[in-house]
Amino acid sequence: CACIQDICRRIHTRMSLQNAARLACASHTFRRSWRCYPNLDLRQRTLGLNGDHISKVDHILQNHSGVGMKKLRIELFDCDKVDSCYISSWLRIAVTAGIEELTLYLPATPEDEAYYSFPYSLLFNGSEDSIRYLDIGLCAFRPTAGLGRWRSLAILSLGNVLIADDELEGLLYNCAALEHLALLNCPEIVCLKIPCLLRRLRVLRVSVCRNMQVIDSNAPNISIFHFSGSLVSISFGSALQVKNVHMECLEFGQSNIVLHARTKLLSYAPNVETLVISSPNEMISTPTLSRRFLHLKYLHISLIGNEAISPDYDYLSLVSFLEASPRLETFILEVRQPCMEHESVLWNASQLRRLPQQGHTSLKSVTIVGFSSAKSLVELTCHIVENATSLERLTLDTSHGCQSSGGCSVNIPQRMYYTESGTLEGATPYMCIPMGEDIIMETVKARLAIRVHVTGKVPSRVMLEVVEPCSWCFGVEDLDA
């Protein structure tokens, strides 16, 4: 009988939550194993509920035996309010079970109401040795000194959480096993300090912490750094392991993050190998400097404009990155704008600038998305064609789409991201949205600029691909220039 129960439990644990619950309703044997179900994903969409989410979650947890629970995920975005006694009760059940992974997002709180205060002390009632993953959001998180250490916590994610500088610093001192730290919209953090004892920390993600001014890390082995928001002072101490950097500025009018990457990034990530940067409206052209990205192999630059990219921005100045990156193999430039105001090469083709010859000997693949007839962009393309002696593929994508779509979903190259395990993956593209009249005309001009100024300069060894928008982008079945 015990053997049969064990088999049933094994079968049950491999089923989805919904199917496991249905089977428990139909079988007394599986009802017993349901009370030990290990992975409880109690989001509304997972449960398929239309009624009272909170009461359903409470019913499931109150009927769980507390034995064998490894993962608990509760997201209450759809709820107006939740009584704190429910949260405390659920956490006690999870802690008693020796929970390993806990995700808890509370209902959004109106601005005039206080955040729910997360009962931090409850987590130090047996789970400090078992919990490996903690993801909490929309609450006040006030760690108390002296409660103990998180001996197994490897991943910590705080989203829309109120936690002060000294509270977070004290928390990190008690997380020696931490490998991944993510902070999203934590408005009380001004100075993020990461102690040197976090030797296992590999991934640091900081997003939209609007009052943050300083990131001061002494963790020696961070290798992946993702940052989104207004530019801040960044220091990684003597750490030389930062290899993958993704930086995105989200505020129009407060950007120049490409300039920051060229002038400041090497001071805290001298050995960067993969660099992805996104700027909402770069105003200052990229300067030529002596400092070099000696290990950079992958460079992805996105220039995004609510309006047209400033006509003062010189695309040819991006050669500064190519000159400074002797091992660069892949270069992707994305230009997103609703219209183009740069000087067109079609109206002024005289005296295309030519920079001194450079041996970009490692560059093999170049993609320009949102290619236009802007004279300085054509000059950049010609420079690459004439100087990248190892170039194998050149893709000029004239599909612009619109800002919300991110470009043509048929043709856009996937933006690359690093997962928690360090694996490079691509984001899923969006569906196309019809382009405006101005950008449709610019697409036609871009194709003409390619035929007149670029195609004849491309060596026979290089595969040139000119990508045109799909019919969805044009909003018609076909358009022929």
Image (spheres, rainbow, N blue to C red):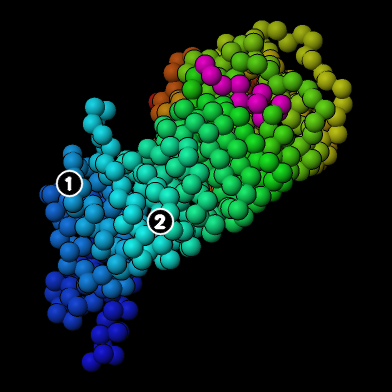
Which residue: 66% across, 7% down? 347
Res. 468 visible in picture:
no
Disc 2 crowd, CA 10 A, few/some/many (<14, 14-19, 20+): some
Inspect the image, locate mark 2, and give the three-letter code of the amino acid beneath it.
Answer: Leu
Q: Nearer the viewer, mark 1 or mark 2?
A: 2
How far apart, in angstroms, are the residues tagged by discs 1 and 2?
25 Å
Would you place residue 267 above or below residue 316 in this image?
below
Check if residue 132 falls in the magenta segment. Answer: no
Q: Secondary structure at mark 2?
A: loop
- In the rendered structure, which segment of residues is drawn in magenta? 253-263
Which residue: 40% across, 39% down? 163
Which residue: 66% across, 30% down? 261
Question: Which quadrant, please, contains the C terminus?
Answer: top right
Residue 102 bears which disc, if any? Answer: none
Q: Which residue is mark 1?
A: 83
Q: Secondary structure at mark 1?
A: loop
